[in-house]
Image: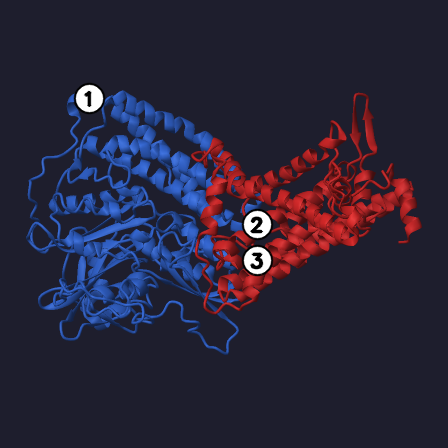
Chain colours: A red, B blue
Amino acid sequence: MSRGETAESLQIAGPLQVGEPLLPERISDITGLGEFGVAGELTAAFLAAFLVGNLMLAMTGVAGPWAKRKITAAFTDRIAVNRAGPAGLFIIVADAVRLLSKENIIPEDADRPAYDLAPIVVASSAMLGFAVIPMGSGVQLADPEVGLVFVFAVAGIASLGLVMAGYASANKYSMLGGLRAVAQNVAYEIPLVVTGMSVVIFAGSLQMSTIVDAQTQTLLDLGIVSIPAWYALVNPFAFVLFLVANFAEVGRNPFDTPEAPTEIVAGYQTEYSSVYFVLIYLGEFLHIFLGGAIIATIFLGGPAGPGPEQLGIVWFLIKIWGVFMLTQWLRSAVPRVRIDQLIEIGWKGLLVLSFANLVLTAVIVGLIA
Amino acid sequence: MSTEIEPRPQDVDVTEDELEALIGDRAIGRDDHLNAPGFVINPDDVQDVLFDLRDEAGFDHLSCLTAQQYQDRYESIYHLKKYVDPTQEVSIVVPTTLDQPVSQSAEPVFRTADWHEREAFDLVGIDYEGHPDPRRILLPETWQGHPLSNDYDQTKPQLVTLSEHENPIQPDHVDSESDTMFLNVGPHHPATHGVLHIKAVLDGETVLDVDPDVGYLHRCEEQMCQQGTYRHQIMPYPDRWDYVSSGLLNEWAYARTAEDLADIEVPEYAQVIRTMGAELCRIASHMLALGTFALDVYGDFTAVFQYAFRDREVVQDILEDLTGQRLMFNYFRLGGVAWDLPEPREEFIAQTRDFLDELPAKVDEYNDLITSNEIFQIRCVDTGILEPEVAKEYGCTGPVARGSGVDIDLRRDDPYGYYENLEWDVVTEDGCDNYSRVLVRMQEVEESAKIIEQCLDLLEEWPEDEREVQANVPRTLKPDADTEVYRAVEGAKGELGIYIRSDGTDKPGRFKIRSPCFHNLSALEQMVQGEYIPDLIASLGSLDIVLGEVDR
């Protein structure tokens, strides 16, 4: 797509604050780092990435040791952590110390360095995805034209990490988990991407900011309230498809077969302990959040919400947490499907439906245009 | 087509004379038990006689095999019953000499004899000729001697090291050329319900063969019971077999057997309390079965597990009020129960009624959450198939057999306690799959609630001066020497039977436990062949085994 076409399609899609600075540019402006040339720009970019990365890590820190426990407890008539600090919040610190001070046990036959690299790959692949997500309030690290493809591509790297963890652990349960992870990711990545493409047909662009802007239009005006043209409302069918494929992609219930405690112990992560365990868990939570971020961006209007525009990031985080809550709800209430059933649902069900959705969307968009 | 249908041999009542005629010359003597005619046969005739009894006389249930050593001989006793009518019993006694304890294996006749005879070999030391798999079952393979034989030195400890024992993590014991993978499920695994080790052979995710390795929890409960006096010292042990809240059901197994042996009459009032207590235990046990099965299928400690435990907790509180204990009740006594309902009586009854009133709503909740969930259905319907004929061959009883459409329930078929006088139904399902077994347990909870309701009505109206909780039983019980009895009750998991031979003292000469879980577990290999790993786990969960009872 040439530059001219992009601009044209952007104009069609809606009002665009052309030239709105990205986070690294803002930082370089504020701190004056821009004056130091490329080195300054680079430092500013690092600073920005550091901010966004830490925001995500902090969210994971809250989600893992505390929120997950509290949410599950609420679903299952329990109280969960309530001793350390207000509402048990200090358990986060206690757990961090506990997990990091544990002995890192590495199996004798582990295939190193694959065994050591796997947790890093799993965690970092999710982190990379956040680079192109527009989080509102001007928080976006980069806005390439191929934003959506970039997100899917880097999130897909996680499968590699899972396979590495699976075979490098020299454990049969890990092996089974690793194999399941690949089979599952292959089966669900295609419907995921194809359904994502139907949004691209609407927006006419792969660029994240364009997709978000396209959703600021009004779908229905009901006098006092006007319903925005979020793609979840424009095409709920695609939204549901994407949601399902996303849960399978990040391996959450009812599709958590690669881990499947009670069946294959803990799947690919059976042998990991201490810091590696933390990294793998970090990766899992980051993947849930990244999944939530993608859903929020391409279906729920990104940072859009009532109130001033500065509140964008708050709305965005609320949407991510909404998706996280949904995963926890499913975890508490829905049985796990069997691995063969999972593959069947992927190849025979979701794939067909997602292509049908793509064709349908193309036809409708074509007719209207 | 002829309208006259030849009646199946099971449906025809067999008299003792007919049995005598059937066995004929092969009987070299009689050794009658208290409740069953006993025939002594030669070790070479075992299969012959058992085939005849199964095919001609319809004894299709090898309920128990007791092995024991006398001063001058070894003895294997096959306790046979009929699935249609468990009150029809016959015992086949097979003596073998001390210097050559070899007896023909009954495995070709009854598949369940496989594990029975392995246990007999393991603990007593009788060899079964023609047995397909003559290994130890409860003790480690390197164990020296047979603990229940007379010449075994029980004071000498044995160190059985891992290196001597078969290495559980040795890479492959299967053909290295083959495409299969050998996988140890357990002894430390999230879904083995205790310490169970399943040696599984897999082809990808498909299970080709499983071999359950039990015995990690073996304490030789039989030996411990043989060292206790009938009157008081044995009753605490049954609580420790099936320790997940089936305590009173287990105690009843011993109480019934010992009361038969010593000819003790139990007052009706005590029987009503026993019945109520036993059914409370059954509800608690089935709740736990439901919760853990959901855990196996759902994959996490989910809402269903917690709800099941929440409701089980209420039952536990009631049982605690009644017996003073939450886990090891020790509430039954020979001739009755330890004490009457707790005071204030009205409060206890009201509290129990409250639980029963709330139960239907809770069962509806379970049905919403579990049985009507579509994912649960695709996971459980048509998996872990156990055909009724296979279930009988493997000696399955209880909810496992009833989930395969085998209509057997000792509470109805061989009545004891106060069950005869109460209104309730035996639940069966014809699905033969994991789903049916869940349905059976859930409906049995409702039936148990019905029974408790009626017991409460009775207890409430029972005249105050007739509330006799214990019969007058002598302080020391010494049943006549060489009286033998095998008696069973319907435990939460199935037929829980006990064989006792008295030797004239105040302690049993031989105490043998027939554990329902042990036999239900032996059917696992039939249920999971060709299924996927997740179904192996689900099927194991649907059997609802408790390793304390499997290993004893």
The one nearer the camera, B454 or B203, is B203
Using a 10 Å C-alpha cutoff, classify the residue at mark 1 as few (fewer than 14 neighbours), some (14 to 19) or many (20 or more).
few
Q: Secondary structure at mark 3?
A: helix
Foreground residue among B381 and B414: B381
Q: Quadrant of residue A294?
A: top right
Image coordinates of residue B98 in percent, x first then y, are 13, 72
What kind of residue is marked 1? Pro
Above or below, comparing residue A14 to residue B32 in the picture: above
Of circles 2 and 1, which is in front? 2
**Tag 2 near tag 1, CB within 8 Å:** no
Looking at the picture, does residue B441 appear above or below residue A248? Answer: above
In percent of width and height, residue B207 lies at 49, 64
Respond whether the residues carrying marks 3 and 2 are from the same subunit.
Answer: yes
Is residue B315 shown above or below A348? Answer: above
Q: Residues within 10 Å of mark 2 (few under 14, many from 20)?
A: many
**C-alpha gap between disc 1 and disc 3:** 72 Å
Question: Which of the numbered marks, if any, corresponds to residue B463?
Answer: 1
Indicate the secondary structure of the residue bearing disc 2. Answer: helix
- Residue in view at x 80 percent, y 50 percent: A144
* Label 3 – label 2 distance at C-alpha: 9 Å
Amino acid on which the number 3 mark rests in the picture = Pro
Which tag is nearer the camera, tag 1 or tag 3? 3
* Tag shown at residue A282: 2
- Pointer 1 and pointer 3: residues touching (CB < 8 Å)? no
Looking at the image, residue A191 sits to the left or right of residue B422; the answer is right
Write down the chain letter for disc 3.
Answer: A
> Which of disc 2 and disc 3 is earlier in sequence?
3
Q: Amino acid at mark 2?
A: Leu
Residue A317 picture location, percent across and down:
66, 37
Q: Which residue is mark 3?
A: A119
| Label 2 in the same subunit as label 1 | no
